[in-house]
Image (cartoon, rainbow, N blue to C red):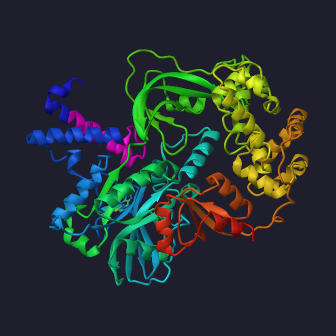
């Protein structure tokens, strides 16, 4: 630790550290350092070696592409090496400007020459795979390995439904397609949730979960891990005429039946690259999968050939990064948070750290057992992950010795908010406050959930106000919200007359709702938005949901025994029925439909994509209308999209729709379609 002054000692220390972490990362799929930290150490070693060339050793991690073969998989020599791309770690626009300047210099383009055309795409955070098709049939799938040889993972890759075993309309002697195997965030969260419920080890991030699944020696286990794939390039090709451009190549690959990400664009010059980097950056959190940057490729394959390669990296491509989604920080303390259903969650209090584009100082530790399995104690250095709109979490601690004894964290026996006994279900992994709606924390969360954007959407009823209302004993139940009057509200601390008026109006407006929103808002355990929608669609009327037996509930799409039981238990409680009655008496209403499929379904079987802002409908409102009409709303444009609904400031999705010739609608067009 005190070796910074002596470059030789520090270089040796860094080599050892990097080798150790590379082994954990590549070979054991069990990384113990965030990438950003690894990159920092790597860069430090590189700079020492540049300053003191004599310290460079042949085995330095800077001198080779890493990755070891595990015993158990056959080794495959790649027909064409699988290269990597140069990375611009500078997350500012200069990253794109530098690349464009380099390309123009290499191509000897003067200032007057036209902008270079690029294919801009996402940098998926998974693992690279080479798919070898012979006469159109998938004959082999291999990992990248060290770039020269990888592992034969054909059995596991064949379990990924998205990867065709036979290409559409291609019978070339050899066509190797390269791309990224990755795990969607929702699949990753669900997988970890299952692991947590089974009290088993969770995965650090989607990339490691995907890498673990691909290199899982038991294909039956691999098949249970939900993997996805995006193609982005070619390997060996024999007997297949290449298109002229990279974007044309991706179109052709999509036409063969392989998934190609729709979030890509053909852009002109540095300005186009910068715009793409910014546009995707703004949408990074709402993408369904992790990306760690974007990739720019010179679009013309002829120009690519002219540019060629330098030290195993193409001169025609670059990866342009975004802020890392995992960072190292210090755990300063552990708090307990009481949730809507009384669940006690240990929450990490962190030294503030910039991760995934924002500063994070709280992160979930999920539950006592997961916390213990990770071995986290106050004072430790920990890795925090924040990706998408998922709550930031502590994924691991750095295995470093502790200088003093720190007691292991224990759950309180009494609820820290209301003092009720904390119970642990027999064999269960969750600790729960037994106070029910007597517990102010649960009451607050129930009110916030009910008022949430996807439930009753009561604008202005945020956590500050809910705290005030509950702490002062003004609102004790959901129906109590509708007894609020102007005087009461305006009398609260820091509440302006106008804001009070707005809340009364929002409460009034919320009374006109939908059955799905109402069911979701009740906060029935296990009933998320999707289940609430399915229930509303299936039963059509609240009375029918309330009266349904467990068997009848099981007939609803995607409702399993645990969910069915939970819904049944909820409505079996007189207290809950009373809440429903009181809410209806307060004037909450919605259109009751006849059961499943009886309402008109003009969009049945259709997939729509929304982009830009519509003149009157919010995105949620448009989504609700489309789903109520039987349609599906997807986040990205592909050949399977039926309509793209575009408002003002529509971005790359609109370009993509035009490129694919997909029917475009404005809001009026959508409403017309819905009314048919
Ligand atoms: S092209 C010769 N395109 O990034 C260029 N790579 O260092 C070959 N990656 O391990 C790569 N998204 O797995 C390319 N759209 C994309 C990519 C992408 C992710 C990964 C790839 C490789 C690494 C490149």
Q: Position of residue 157 (x, y in %)?
A: 49, 64
Q: Position of residue 577 (x, y in %)?
A: 89, 37
Which residue appears farthest toward the left when viewing the image? 54
Seen in the picture, residue 133 relative to 418 is either above or below; the reply is below
Quadrant location of the C terminus in the rendered image: bottom right
Location of residue 307 (image quadrant): bottom left
Q: Position of residue 520 (x, y in %)?
A: 75, 44
How many tags in the picture?
0
Q: Say whether residue 671 is left or right of residue 231.
A: right
Principal secondary structure, stretch drawn in magenta: helix
Quadrant where ligand 1 appears:
bottom left
Quadrant location of the N terminus in the rendered image: top left
Location of residue 585 (image quadrant): top right
Q: Position of residue 559 (x, y in %)?
A: 76, 52
Q: Looking at the image, which is closer to me, 253 or 58?
A: 253
Tell me which segment is drawn in magenta.
Answer: 12-35
Q: Is residue 453 magenta?
A: no
Identify the residue shown where x is 37% and y is 79%: 174
Which residue appears farthest toward the front when viewing the image? 498
Identify the residue shown where x is 27% and y is 50%: 94
| Residue 517 visible in the picture | yes
Seen in the picture, residue 317 relative to 282 is either above or below; the reply is below
| Residue 381 visible in the picture | no
Q: Looking at the image, which is closer to me, 448 or 332?
A: 448
Seen in the picture, residue 27 relative to 362 is either above or below; the reply is below
Identify the residue shown where x is 75% and y is 37%: 507
Location of residue 5 (image quadrant): top left
Q: Say whether residue 151 is left or right of residue 101.
A: right
């Amino acid at each position: 630790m005190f070796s910074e002054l002596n470059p030789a000692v520090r270089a040796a220390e860094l080599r050892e550290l990097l080798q150790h972490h590379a082994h954990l990362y590549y070979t054991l799929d069990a990384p113990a350092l965030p990438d950003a930290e690894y990159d920092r150490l790597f860069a430090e070693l590189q700079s020492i070696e540049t300053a003191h060339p004599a310290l460079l050793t042949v085995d330095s991690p800077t001198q080779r592409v890493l990755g070891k073969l595990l015993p158990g998989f056959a080794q495959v020599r790649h027909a064409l090496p699988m290269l990597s791309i140069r990375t611009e770690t500078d997350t500012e626009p200069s990253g794109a400007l530098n690349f464009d300047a380099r390309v123009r210099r290499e191509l000897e383009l003067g200032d007057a020459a036209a902008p270079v055309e690029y294919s801009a795409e996402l940098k998926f955070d998974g693992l690279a795979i080479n798919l070898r098709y012979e006469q159109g049939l998938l004959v082999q799938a291999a990992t990248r390995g060290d770039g020269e040889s990888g592992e034969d993972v054909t059995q596991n890759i064949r379990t990924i439904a998205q990867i065709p075993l036979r290409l559409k309309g291609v019978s070339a002697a050899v066509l190797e397609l390269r791309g990224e195997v990755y795990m969607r965030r929702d699949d990753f969260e669900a997988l970890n949730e299952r692991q947590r419920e089974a009290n088993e080890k969770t995965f650090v991030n989607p990339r490691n979960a995907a890498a673990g699944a691909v290199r899982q020696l038991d294909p039956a286990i691999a098949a249970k891990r939900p993997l996805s794939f995006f193609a982005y390039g070619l390997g060996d090709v024999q007997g297949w005429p290449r298109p002229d451009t990279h974007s044309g190549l991706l179109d052709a690959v999509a036409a063969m039946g392989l998934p190609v990400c729709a979030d890509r664009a053909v852009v002109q010059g540095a300005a186009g690259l910068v715009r793409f980097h910014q546009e995707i950056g703004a949408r990074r959190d709402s993408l369904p999968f992790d990306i760690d940057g974007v990739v720019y490729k010179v679009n013309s394959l002829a120009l690519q050939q002219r540019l060629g390669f330098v030290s195993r990296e193409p001169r025609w491509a670059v990866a342009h990064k975004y802020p890392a989604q995992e960072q190292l920080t210090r755990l300063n303390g552990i708090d307990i948070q009481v949730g809507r259903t009384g669940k006690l969650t240990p929450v990490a209090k962190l030294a503030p750290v910039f991760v995934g584009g924002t500063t994070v100082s709280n992160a979930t530790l999920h539950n006592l057992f997961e916390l213990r399995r990770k071995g986290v104690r106050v004072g430790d250095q920990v890795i925090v992950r924040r990706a998408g709109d998922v709550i930031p979490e502590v994924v691991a601690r750095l295995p470093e010795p502790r200088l003093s004894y720190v007691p292991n964290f224990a759950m309180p026996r009494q609820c820290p908010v209301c003092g009720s006994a904390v119970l642990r279900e027999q064999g269960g992994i969750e600790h729960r406050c037994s106070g029910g709606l007597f517990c102010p924390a649960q009451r607050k969360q129930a009110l916030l959930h009910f008022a949430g954007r996807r439930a009753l959407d009561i604008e202005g009823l945020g956590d500050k106000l809910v705290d005030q209302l509950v702490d002062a004993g003004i609102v004790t139940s959901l129906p109590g919200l509708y007894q609020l009057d102007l005087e009461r509200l305006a009398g609260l601390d820091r509440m302006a007359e106008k804001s009070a008026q707005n809340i009364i109006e929002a409460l009034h407006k919320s009374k006109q709702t939908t059955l799905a929103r109402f069911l979701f808002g009740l906060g029935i355990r296990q009933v998320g938005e999707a289940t609430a929608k399915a229930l509303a669609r299936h039963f059509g009327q609240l009375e029918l949901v309330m009266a349904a037996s467990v068997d009848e509930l099981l007939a609803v799409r995607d409702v399993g025994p645990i969910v069915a039981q939970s819904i049944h238990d909820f409505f079996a409680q007189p207290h809950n029925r009373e809440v429903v009655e009181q809410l209806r008496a307060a004037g909450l209403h919605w259109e009751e439909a006849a059961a499943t499929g009886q309402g008109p379904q003009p969009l049945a079987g259709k997939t729509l994509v929304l982009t830009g802002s519509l003149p009157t409908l919010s995105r949620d409102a448009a989504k609700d209308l489309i789903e109520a009409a039987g349609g599906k709303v997807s986040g990205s444009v592909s050949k399977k999209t039926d309509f793209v609904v575009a408002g003002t400031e529509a971005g790359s999705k609109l370009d993509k729709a035009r490129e694919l010739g997909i029917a475009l609608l404005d809001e009026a067009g959508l409403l017309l379609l819905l009314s048919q």
